[in-house]
Amino acid sequence: MQPTKNQIALAELKFSYQALKRPLEVSKAKFSFKFLKRISGKPLSNHENERYVLFVNEKQHVFSWYKFQDFGIAGNYIQQVIGLALACNAYGIVILKYNHERPLFIDSVDELFVSTCFDTCEKVKIDIIDYIICNPKTYLSYRKQCLKD
């Protein structure tokens, strides 16, 4: 029997139990941005994006993260995120979209993705802490920009 994409993604889930000097409270976008800078790798070309999902516990501290290799269809991506969050018993998630040296803005694709993701997560009782778009210098928080939290 061949493993499904979700089973493969789950097998690749990277757990990060490195003790931090201070708890990382990801409800604040700047801390999620700093965490992303620690885990992201090489600089990207202008047309590339990397997407990460951070899984958090009830205190909103990161306990694991996953880097998606291929974004593909947004619906499949959301199903993978939800499947991984349920499998590792996460309280909530933070989704990070990393662009290298590009202007940051929330476009219609981001809006559609976030609204679909929020609706799906609400059905399975997983909290979406934030959707953050960032480059090496700064970040844009969907929660702050669009929801005015």
Image (spheres, rainbow, N blue to C red):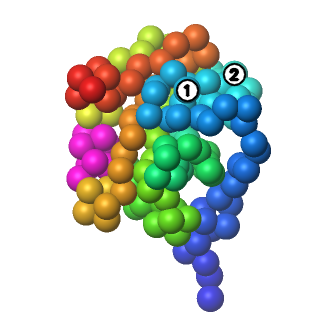
Q: Quadrant of residue 67?
A: top right
| Secondary structure of the residue carrying numbered label 2 | loop
Residue 125: percent from left, percent from top: 31, 61
Identify residue for label 2.
43
Identify residue for label 1.
31
Residue 137: percent from left, percent from top: 58, 11
In the displayed structure, does residue 124 sit left or right of residue 140?
Answer: left
Q: Which dot, 2 or 1, sits closer to the camera?
A: 1
The rendered magenta stretch, by its main secondary structure, is classed as helix
Residue 41: percent from left, percent from top: 73, 31
Query: Is residue 39 placed above or below 72 in the rendered structure?
Result: above
Residue 115 located within the stretch drawn in magenta: yes
Q: Name the residue at 65% across, 25% down.
A: 37
Which disc number belongs to residue 142? Answer: none
Q: Nearer the viewer, residue 18 or 95?
A: 18
Residue 19: percent from left, percent from top: 75, 42
| Secondary structure of the residue carrying numbered label 1 | helix
Question: Range of the magenta residues?
Answer: 112-119
Q: Disc 2 residue type? A: Pro
Judge the density around disc 2: few (<14), some (14-19), many (≥20) Cα neighbours within 10 Å: few
Q: Nearer the viewer, residue 59 or 3?
A: 59
